[in-house]
Amino acid sequence: MFDSIVFSSVSEFLQMGTYAVHVWTVYAVFAVFIFVNLYLPLVQRRQFIREQKRRAQRDAQMGKVSADQNAGQADDSVVPGESE
Amino acid sequence: MWLWFSKLGSPKWFYELTTKWLPWLVVFMAVSMTVGLVWALLFVPEDYQQGFTNRIFYVHVPVASISLAAFPLMAVAGVITMVWKMKLADMVAKCAAPIGAWFTAVALITGAVWGQPTWGTWWVWDARLTSLLLQFFLLIGVIALRSAIESPDSAAKACALLSIVGAINVPIIKYSVEWWNTLHQPATDLTMNESGANGPEIWVPLLIMIAAVYCFFAVSLILATRNEILMRERRSQWVMDIVAKAKV
């Protein structure tokens, strides 16, 4: 299998004939393209979950505080504010 | 049938289905991408005219051909949005636009880098290149349109309409190399017959790369759509459950 590799050395492979700049530019662009489009959504997801967790925590706290304050009263005044 | 259709349109259903499918898609993408890249870079013989710039072919052709899938996808999603008001279709369309723009940009850049040694120029205003550049601007237009309209419903409708109109450009790009005399070569003949100038050692790695890049398109679109679903459905119980269970 390795016999059919068309390059006889690593430096020959890196040189790509005389087209090292062209070939490796294209493959670098391709690598960045793939990385960005797979990594970015994962970062966004993590950010979203972190934010929602914080919000849920805050809402829970607010609910508790207002429940203490309005002990005995019906609590329908707390509407968690949207901050976007 | 209608039950199935409305179930298909449910963001929750899509989210759960892709949770199951995503690992398989990622594995298939990683394997085919590795095999395709190693084959293309190490084993494909040097072209007698182009030398080793033929390596660029294995990135440029898959990316460029799959970039053409963005607009038809967005147009179909647009029709579904306009006719059945399916929320999921609009989410997919919204996420497909920037990914399509990436694909188009990479196709243009890799094409330019390939054109420089083979044609002696980075850019010519020939039909194929110009129509693909137009696709890039149309996609930027769709993205800008969505962010310019405040009401999500109106934005969805406007983008659906622009996507349907923009899809007209796709056959123009595809057949530009046949309708006009262009510097860009016609589509590669991938029929499996022996009469083609290229043997299997040229086109098999290309097919593998096309499959890999298609998978990559699917994976990135699914990841983005899942985020969009979580975002828009963040007040529903099932998303809150996911958030509660997720570890950050």
Image: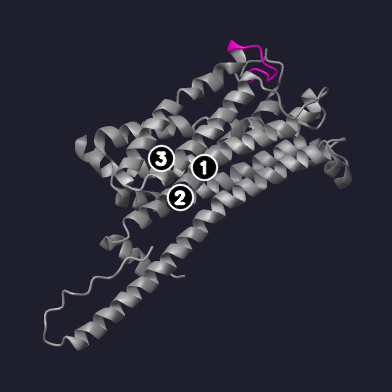
- Residue that badge 2 annotates: B224
Q: Residue B35's x, y, as percent?
A: 65, 42
Q: Which mark is residue B99?
A: 1
Residue type at tag 1: Ile
**Separation of residues labelled 3 and 1 (CA atoms):** 10 Å
Q: Main secondary structure of the magenta part?
A: loop
Q: Nearer the viewer, residue A23 or A44?
A: A44
Q: Secondary structure at mark 2?
A: helix
- Residue that badge 3 annotates: B93
**Which badge, 2 or 3, is on the more N-terminal residue?**
3
Q: Is residue B181 magenta?
A: yes
Quarter of the figure that contains the N terminus of chain B: top left
Mark 3 burial class by Cα count in 10 Å: few <14, some 14-19, many 20+: many
Is residue A67 found left or right of B35 in the rendered image? left
Q: Quadrant of residue B168?
A: top left
Q: Quadrant of residue A82?
A: bottom left
Q: Are marks 1 and 2 in contact (CB under 8 Å)?
A: yes
Q: Residue at x 35, y 71 (%)?
A: A55
* Pointer 3 chain: B
Magenta residues?
A: B179-188
Q: Residue B71's x, y, as percent?
A: 46, 31
Is residue B205 found left or right of B97 in the rendered image? right
Residue B42 seen in render: no
Q: Residue at x 38, y 67 (%)?
A: A52
Q: Are marks 2 and 3 in contact (CB under 8 Å)?
A: no
Q: Nearer the viewer, residue B118 or B21?
A: B118
**Separation of residues labelled 2 and 3 (CA atoms):** 11 Å
* Pointer 1 chain: B
